Amino acid sequence: MTAHLPFPFRKSGRILPALLLCGTASALIAADAPTGGEPGVRAFVLGNIYLVNGGPADSCPTEDEGGLDRYYAMLSPADKARFAGKEKRQALEQHMNEQFGFRRIFLRGERAADVKFPPGYDPAKTPTPEQAIAIGALNGLPKGTGRLAFQNREVVYSACSNPYDFPALAKKFRTYEGPVAAGMNLDGKVGRHDFAGPDGEKGVDNQLWRAVGCVRPFREGSDPAIAHKLQLSARAPTLIELRGVDDLNNDPDVTVTVYAATDALTRDARGGVLAGATFAVDPDPRLTATTRGRIENGVLTTDAFDVRINYREQIIDAPRDIRAARIRARMTPDGGIEGTFFGYYTLDSFYASIEQFTMNGANLSGLSCPGVRLAIDRLADGYRDPKSGRNSAISSAYGFYGVRAFVAPRQQIARTEQ
């Protein structure tokens, strides 16, 4: 129903031509117009959210070697000779899988023909975590193990799904020990475990970077030059909307809302994120969060708020739960936005992306799943769990960049889909 489609509006990955809509513009009422274009409102879609590096003073002399290399170091001299060389990496991985008893239980297709399922299991539905453990038990996995993976199509047992079972693959895990890291002083204190910021700020809290700042995939992805060329979570990007903006350089009171979008990113002719597209908002209320902010000398800073940020990429679906998050960002000359989410990333939501990364992905990228899990557990510095007495979240800093966008009202999306 084009009578309700404002320009620009993206549906099924297309931008509808202006000529198609010019005859309907006069029929639009204010409630039908996408937000982000009217006075006092700015909206942006983010192309990437990534662990941010502390700059030239942030260095790691020796990166962590990863789980597969640790396994190779455990082998006898004869087996080391047998699996030496890059061309033997796949055979080495298979050998590790067999020795440690890693398994994949397929839930669909021909390879699921001999799999045992618990009573009442409906193969048409996504199993619960409890059902995954039950399936694992029926098919020979150790008691209490088995996690869903590969878009919930498999139950797996490996050093990534069950990292505590394989501490040998975390031995001598290398953490980042440098004095400088990106971040923010989240607790208002200056402690001996804190970093100095690249700009000299004292008491910077970023224990997640201490945990993974020497792990190759995180370190490579933290390079802004690389991060700005990537589009991650492209099929479920994040939106930031500013309301009540009187002056983009100085405004003491603006409303900031972070949404999850249901539309995928579209690339422009140069391969970047297309600016000016309209995005529908995910109706899940857990994926919308609002806070107050202020703009001083062109820099937006928000109050603390809890936010859940979508992270969907290929086989990964692991929303980022960040407690007491703050945003610090600046509007760029081209109309976009660039900044950082600071806050306490819950351990389980962070590790969910590692768990879903799979054992093969970890080996290919040089990552030790047990090393990462044990490191974040040990270095967690926020939100103590009253039952376990251990911290359940870890201070972090995630950079982002985005382009100008529009947010389609939910009532309008509902009508156009009828």
Image (cartoon, rainbow, N blue to C red):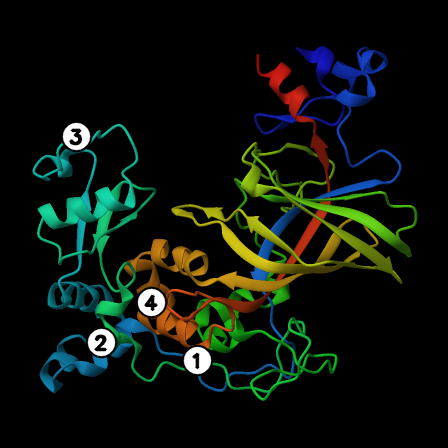
Q: Are marks 4 and 2 in contact (CB under 8 Å)?
A: no
Circle 1 residue: 63
- Quarter of the picture containing the N terminus is top right
Q: Amino acid at mark 3?
A: Gly
- Residue located 82% across and 22% down the image: 30
Mark 1 closeness class: few <14, some 14–19, many ≥20 residues within 10 Å: some
Q: Amino acid at mark 4?
A: Cys
- Residue located 60% across and 81% down the image: 58
Note whether 35 is above or below 332 in the view shown: above
Along the viewing direction, whichever of 143 and 385 lies nearer the viewer: 385
Q: Amino acid at mark 2?
A: Tyr
Q: CA distance from mark 1 to mark 4?
A: 15 Å
- Is residue 295 rendered to the left or right of residue 14? right
Q: Mark 3 or mark 1, which is nearer to you? A: 3
Circle 2 residue: 71
- Quarter of the picture containing the C terminus is top right
Q: Tally the marks.
A: 4
Q: Earlier in the sequence, mark 1 or mark 2?
A: 1
Q: Earlier in the sequence, mark 3 or mark 4?
A: 3
- Is residue 232 rendered to the left or right of residue 270? left
Q: Mark 3 or mark 4, which is nearer to you? A: 3
Q: Residue furthest front?
A: 386
Q: Are marks 1 and 2 in contact (CB under 8 Å)?
A: no
Q: Earlier in the sequence, mark 1 or mark 4?
A: 1
Q: Earlier in the sequence, mark 3 or mark 1?
A: 1
Q: Position of residue 185 (x, y in %)?
A: 67, 74
Q: CA distance from mark 2 to mark 3?
A: 40 Å
Q: Position of residue 339 (x, y in %)?
A: 71, 60
Q: Position of residue 397 (x, y in %)?
A: 60, 66
Circle 4 residue: 369
